[in-house]
Amino acid sequence: RDLRADGAQRLCHRGRQRLCQPHHRAQPKAHNDSRLRLLAAREEAMQEVVRDARARVRERVKDRSAYTSLLQALLAQALAQLEEPADGTALVRCRASDADAVKAALEPARQAYAAAAGAGAPKLVIDAANPLPPAAAPGLEDDSPEGTTCAGGVSVASTGGRVVCCNTLDARVRIAYEALLPSIRSALFGVAI
């Protein structure tokens, strides 16, 4: 009996000692808080890269001749993705402000696709009833929720709308970010995370 009481008393003393020493609990919490701050700072740096890429895209759109040739390439690429037959029709969605530039790019894009594919290109029709969202107001570009604004580009749908190729500039930045994420992390932080 004395041994059990003595052992229980020692266990109780050890338990109280651990509970009475606050540094035993504060140390892991401080380490975890530090780790969380580091992760938040890294995420902020990653988001800064995305914001910078989006700003560069917005600058590219301002050069109308370069933007028209970009639209032509995006349309030709979308046609290649859709594989729509030559007798079909593809619906092109764009921002209302880009309608004239897209109209100018339609025929050159069809010709580029036909030359690359070695086959006829489908008819391209602008869907004026369902335009893409407009560009964000200046200064609010980074505060807009995803999908409420569009930096430019096109979205092309096959006949019947069953297949859609979203070639908007916002989608391209997002895809590039996701594909290059390990390289971006390595460039920013020096190691793959």
Image (cartoon, rainbow, N blue to C red):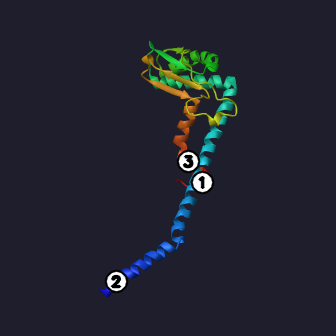
**Quarter of the N terminus within the rendering:** bottom left
Q: In this view, does 57 lie to the left or right of 115?
A: right
| Residue matched to label 1 | 189
Front position among marks 3 and 2:
2
| Residue matched to label 3 | 183
CA gap between label 3 and label 2 equals 62 Å
Front position among marks 3 and 1:
1
Q: What element carries label 3?
A: helix
| Residue matched to label 2 | 5
Q: Is mark 2 on a helix, strand or loop?
A: helix
Q: Furthest residue to the left?
A: 1
Front position among marks 1 and 2:
2
Q: Which amino acid does label 3 sit on?
A: Ser
Q: Viewer-proximal residue, 167 or 75?
A: 167
The image position of residue 117, as x and y in percent, is 48, 22
Q: What residue type is labelled 2?
A: Ala
Determine the residue positioned at 54% across, 32% down: 171
CA gap between label 3 and label 1 equals 10 Å
